[in-house]
Amino acid sequence: MTQSFLSQRPQEAKKLYPYQEEAIKKILAVLLERGDNSNILFQLPTGGGKTVIFSEIVRRFIHKTNQKVLILTHRIELLRQTLRALNETGVPSRLVTSEVKELDKNEENVCYLAMVETLSNRLQEDHKFIGDIDLVIVDEAHYNSFKKIFKYFEKATILGVTATPLSSNLNLPLNRFYQKVIVGQSISSLIELGYLSDATTLTYDVDLKSLKIGFDGDYTTSSLDQFYSNYDMQDKLLAAYAEKSKGLKTLIFNSSIATSKIVKDLFTKAGYEIKHLDSTNNKVERKATLEWFRKKPDAILTSVGILTTGFDEPTVESIILNRATRSLTLYHQMIGRGSRRLPNKSHFNIIDLGDNARRLGLWQEYIDWAEIFVNPWKYIEYLNHKEQEMNAVPLYRIPDEVKDQFPNTDYEDFEFNVIERYEDCITKGQSTTGVIDECMEHHLKIILDNANDDLFRAIELLPLLDDEINFRLQLYTSCMSKTTPNYFAWLYEDYIKKLKSKIRVNTKIIE
């Protein structure tokens, strides 16, 4: 079989960027030498053009070797996207769908495309259903569903492609199936080179202590739904949109279909035009919704995970993460929907309502993917440690030089457990403002015990407790899901004003 017609990339095909050409040459060099038949993993950020790259690899590989190639995906959208790229590149290809019961061994197609579940079913019935494959390309290789296919292609080389080389199943790390990793350009370098849009991440204070972690290591859908459906979070979402996304084409990612529908109703009642999309929508509904989203400049689309892969709408200007996640892959997939660059778009917003940036880092931050590939557990331990630090109650101990000004109060008598009292109020159905009142009475007692009824001395002692007062108020507001810097400023001013008033009532001017 001679593939001379594949010797040149068609003129009408999309021009390859220099970094794409560099990655193609690097990967091909390993594929063509592969004396040890090692499987390869290639990492490149979302928006970097992974499909374009591996489609061109297919063309050059077939031209050099006259061997057949199989491309596997897990989503129909990715399958169609890949087919378009192969057609553009000039590679004869064949879709292996559920309707295809057998393959003609003599057909001229040199590249096959299949969804992993479809091919797995065929191979279970007939392990020789598709043969003579020399290269298998796995798109979105971090998904663990592909491993069941590998045993049928032990003589082939497998090239996995992903933006995040971290397995969806931590008990089956990618380095068990791939022997080498090739890391492409980083997000920050693609931004600097002008290939990706830069982003501004806007974070909002949220109290996530009620979230539960499931068997997969991420937060459970039920705990996320309960948290993000409460009125405080709904108000925060609307306020965040109005402040930073209004007028921009916006994608909102949620934890479930139920929460996404709540968001749709919430925005509709607020007077915004918004649509909801999930996996239960049929092809006609999906096509109509995405067409509306593409054409409307300030469209708002709320969904779950259906748009994290195989969806490409470069005009997206704002991503709202109306969920928390511990998955670095999901985090990057969601944000990547806004990273496409256009002549009139070099920037987009990320509105983070799940503390995701604090937990997983800013989207643009450098990540050592080669190290993560080699030792994924080390990275997971790092994330767990970071999350523990985030959730830890900060400690404050009054400095010795300040304590010296309060000789009649022992160190332990300065302690007041704000969080314990707050939770006690919630349990008893009491107003949590009582915590502030108790705090104030405690500070008043400390001041009075050391002022000897002297008003002027009491007023002098009050500023010395400023850091301690700030610490307690921060703990108090951290227990609340809806707080703003303005609220904290008001709370502090009101606290000081009332405490001064109590001091004046309980002391006198001593000559």
Image (cartoon, rainbow, N blue to C red):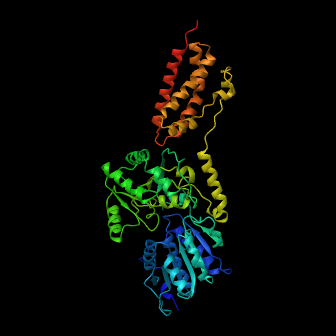
Q: Residue furthest top?
A: 511
Does residue 87 sit above or below 129 in this rendering?
A: above
Determine if residue 75 is in view. Answer: yes
Which one is nearer the viewer's eye here, 487 or 61? 487
Q: Nearer the viewer, residue 432 or 321?
A: 432
Q: Residue furthest bottom?
A: 106
Look at 52% across and 60% down and name the residue there.
Answer: 330
**Is residue 508 positioned above or below 168 on the image?**
above
Quadrant (top left/top right/bottom left/bottom right) for the C terminus? top right
Residue 173, quarter of picture: bottom right
Image coordinates for residue 71, horizontal then vertical, percent: 51, 78
Q: Which residue is at a point 45% across and 68% down the rendered structure image?
A: 310
Q: Nearer the viewer, residue 325 or 94?
A: 325
- Percent position (x, y) of residue 455? 56, 13
Residue 92: x and y in percent read 46, 84
- Circle count: 0
Query: Would residue 62 be seen by someone viewing this image from the given angle?
Result: no
Q: Position of residue 96 (x, y in %)?
A: 46, 82
- Relative to the observer, which residue lies in front, 181 or 177? 177
